[in-house]
Every structure is written in C-alpha cells, then in structure tokens.
Image (spheres, rainbow, N blue to C red):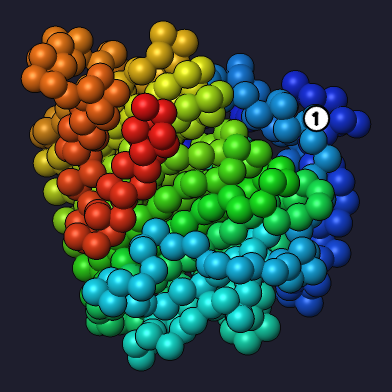
C-alpha cells in the first residue's frame, strides 16, 4: 500500500535561477548512468526526477518544513557525482560502532560502501540466514529487476519534495535488504558508509529498499562515518516496507566529518500488527537532516522513533518526522534529546497526524535539549493534528542550561567541574539511550556519547 501523500501549503520552490541551479551538473548525466540504463521504467523515474527537480530547485527557508535549515550554501560547491572508480580506494580499517577483538559482540552480515560505492572485498554475507538477501542496488538491477519494479518508488511518492526528486534523478548506489516470511534474524546487519576519501568534492545519491515479509524480524545498524578530509554530499532515500506482524529495528549513527552534508529521508509503511523502531544518533557533519515519514497502515501497527544529537562547533543537525495514524488501535512514541555546545544548532520538527478512521490511537512525542553555550540554538516544533475523537495523544518540548545547583552540589563533594558537567550530560541523555532495545548496541551508543564529552576529549 502506498504512503499517504503529505499535504503542503506550497511546493518546495527554489529562489535560485535555473542557470545556477545546484547539482545541475549532476543532472546532466542523469539517465546516462549505466545503473539500470536498460530498464525503461527506471529511466522514467530518473527523467521524472530531473524534470521535477528543475522545477523545484533546492528547498528554500520560506517553506515551513525548511524554515530552520538553509541549503542554499550547497550552490557554492561543485560536487562530482561519485562513480565506482571513486569507491576503489585503499581503506586500512573498516570502522564499526563495536570495539574490535571482542568475541562477545554480534557478528552479523556487513555491507560496506566507500564514497558511496559498494565494496565486496570489505563486506561479508557469511552469516545471513536462509531467506535473507542483502545486495548492492547494482546487483539487484542486474539479477532481479522485477523485485525493484514492484517496490522502488512505491512509498516515496511525494512529487513536491525537491530532495526526493533529486535522488530519483541521480540515484547511483544503494542496497536492497529482503527478509522472507517468518525469518527471524538473530544478529544485526551492519551497513557502513565511509566518506571523504577523495581528491575532490563528491556527491552520492543512494537509494535503499528494505522489504520485510510477514512475521519476519531484523535489526540493522547504519553507520555513516567520515574518514578523509574531502568535502562530500550524501542525499539518501530509504523505502521501508513491513508486512503483517513484521518487526524492524534500525539504529543509525551519523558520525560524518565536518566537511560533510548528509540529507536522509526514510519512508516506512507499517501494516497490521507490524512494528518499526528507529534510533538516530547524530554526532558530526557540517549539516545533517534526518527525515522520517511513517504510515501506520494497519490495526495494531506501531512505531517508535527515538534519537540523540550532540553538536559542537558550528554543526547543524535537523530531525524532521511525520507519523500518520491511518487505522484504529495504532501506537506511536517519539523521544529526542540533544546537547548543544559552541555555536551549534539543532532542529526538531515532529508531527503526529491522527486520521478520522484511526480511533483509539495513542501518540506520544517529546523533545528536550541541553544548551552548554549561550550561542547554541535549538528550534523545536512538536505538533499534533487530530481528526478522531477517541485518542490518547500528548507532546512536549523543553530546553535549558546545565543545572547550576546540581553542579554546585557535586563540586562541594570534590568532583571537578568538567567531570561534574559530563556526569550531568550523561544523566540527561540516559532516558533516551535506555530506549535502545539491544544491549550490545546500547553499550556502543553510550561509548560514542562518552567519547564526545569534553573530558574524553582531553579538555581538562
């Protein structure tokens, strides 16, 4: 079933003249890329994306959804579309959120991308159970294009979204995860994206599909990490389909370099009694935006969207989400917490929409932010839009500085000031980090947070 169209008061229109349209050079090669060149239906998607993006341009800040995140600076950078040659560069160590050498940690399948391109030599599929396939998009195009035709472009269908149109036009990599009916995966799958190892700024446009059949279960870890010093731009679209009573948990770690811009959009369709959970940890990037659009399309469907963001310097982090309760007895829960230092900025935009037929829906949304600097900024906008009369919904937002009374209490007992601040930060984030369901992944997330803290960085 297709995702509901997201109504907008106005389409995403650019204020940039067409002759200076960002990514015009990338569009010039769209449709000529050998990825799926022989598939007419895929080329139709590409060409429709080209036309629509040229009409829309980059989303501007006069749009409500983009009011707090300005992409016009992208026009100042000339990005070269990544090719397989850009992915064929030396990689000494594949980063992982798990410490190396620990035999107690899960050892599931791993798919590695370098500069946006899949690397078979760095990946492993040996632990995939029967009934599960995880393949690069290019391989699926060659060997099973019928599966793509059924699923690609069926959930992400909003033609007024410029970054989706750009991905439709320029998609040049990605993966397809297919979990068959009744298959329960014991170990998580790791998807690792390594960026920045290049001589020039690169742009990559991954298109990923996750297809969970009836009663299947899987956990995924998606890790974006910057290694080299080059600038790069990633515009990702994920289409996630959950069959009846399926369960998918996705753990995202965005640890890009400070030369990176990462725009990711997730479109999930959750059917009867299915469960979709996502945890997003944002630590890096010059600018990142993580969008999630969930349709609860069956009785008993539920989703849980959580996240933590830790920004410093002039980093900008945007978490934007929308959950549509379309059927009765559906449940959603959202919690995002963040810590901002220096001149960093974060955005949280969340909307829960309860449609007229979605009686007895339960939707909860909360966002809290700790500001470590007077120059840091949080823009938060949680919303409820309710058309049913038998619901249980709530939302809230709060922001503030470190509790000085608690700091004084801890200093009076001999705890150094910086260490006391770190303990308060960890305590503040504990509530959301505890919502990570897998112990080993939760420990890895906590380790990432610990290394972000000032004491861990040697500032005392």
48 lies left or right of 304: right
Residue in the image at 59% along x and 43% along y: 257
Rendered image quadrant of residue 96: bottom left
373 lies left or right of 73: left
Residue in the image at 19% along x and 38% along y: 430
Residue that label 1 marks:
76
Residue 186 image position (x, y, % from top left)? 25, 77
364 lies left or right of 231: left
Residue in the image at 76% along x and 55% along y: 198
Q: Give the SS element for disc 1.
A: helix
Quadrant, the C terminus: top left
438 lies left or right of 453: left
Q: Can residue 144 be seen in this view?
A: yes
| Vertical position of residue 127 compared to residue 83: above or below | below
| Vertical position of residue 100 compared to residue 352: above or below | below
Q: Give whichever of 41, 59 is nearer the camera.
A: 59
| Vertical position of residue 288 compared to residue 73: above or below | below
Residue 409 image position (x, y, % from top left)? 10, 15
Residue in the image at 24% along x and 62% along y: 440
Question: What is the count of numbered marks?
Answer: 1
Q: Residue furthest right?
A: 19
For mark 1, does the 10 Å Cα neighbourhood hold few (<14), some (14 to 19), or many (20 or more) residues?
few
Q: Is residue 214 visible?
A: no
Rendered image quadrant of residue 59: top right
């Amino acid at each position: 079933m297709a995702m509901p169209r997201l109504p907008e008061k106005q389409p995403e229109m650019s204020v940039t003249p067409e002759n200076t349209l960002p990514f015009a050079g990338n569009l010039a090669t769209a449709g000529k890329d050998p990825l799926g060149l022989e598939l007419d239906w895929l080329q139709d998607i590409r060409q429709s994306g080209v036309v629509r993006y040229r009409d829309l341009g980059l989303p501007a800040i006069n749009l409500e959804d983009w009011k707090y995140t300005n992409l016009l600076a992208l026009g100042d950078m000339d990005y070269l579309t990544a090719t397989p040659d850009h992915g064929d560069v030396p990689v000494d160590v594949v980063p992982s959120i798990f410490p190396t050498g620990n035999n107690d940690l899960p050892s599931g399948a791993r798919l590695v991308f370098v500069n946006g391109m899949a690397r078979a030599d760095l990946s492993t599929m040996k632990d995939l159970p029967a009934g599960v396939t995880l393949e690069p998009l290019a391989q699926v195009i060659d060997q099973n294009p019928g599966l793509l035709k059924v699923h690609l472009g069926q959930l992400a269908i909003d033609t007024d979204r410029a970054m989706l149109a750009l991905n439709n036009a320029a998609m040049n990599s990605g993966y397809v995860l297919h979990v068959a009916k009744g298959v329960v995966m014991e170990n998580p799958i790791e998807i690792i994206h390594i960026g920045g190892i290049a001589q020039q700024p690169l742009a990559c446009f991954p298109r990923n599909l996750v297809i969970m059949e009836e009663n299947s279960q899987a956990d995924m870890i998606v890790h974006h990490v910057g290694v080299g010093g080059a600038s790069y731009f990633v515009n990702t679209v994920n289409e996630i389909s959950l069959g009846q009573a399926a369960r998918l948990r996705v753990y995202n770690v965005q640890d890009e370099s400070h030369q990176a811009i990462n725009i990711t959009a997730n479109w999930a369709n959750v059917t009867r009694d299915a469960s979709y959970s996502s945890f997003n940890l944002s630590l890096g990037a010059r600018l990142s935006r993580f969008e999630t659009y969930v349709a609860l399309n069956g009785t008993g469907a539920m989703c849980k969207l959580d996240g933590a963001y830790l920004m410093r310097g002039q980093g900008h982090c945007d978490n934007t989400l929308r959950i549509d309760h379309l059927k009765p007895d559906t449940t959603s829960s959202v919690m995002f917490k963040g810590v901002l230092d220096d001149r960093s900025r974060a955005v949280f935009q969340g909307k829960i929409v309860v449609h007229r037929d979605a009686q007895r829906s339960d939707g909860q949304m909360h966002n809290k932010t700790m500001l470590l600097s007077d120059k840091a900024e949080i823009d938060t906008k949680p919303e409820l839009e309710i058309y049913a009369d038998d619901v249980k919904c709530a939302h809230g937002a709060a922001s503030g500085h470190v509790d000085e009374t608690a700091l004084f209490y801890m200093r009076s007992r001999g705890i150094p000031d910086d260490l006391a601040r770190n303990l308060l930060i960890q305590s503040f984030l504990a509530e959301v980090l505890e919502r990570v369901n897998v112990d080993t992944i939760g420990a890895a997330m906590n380790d990432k947070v610990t290394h972000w803290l000032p004491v861990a960085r040697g500032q005392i």
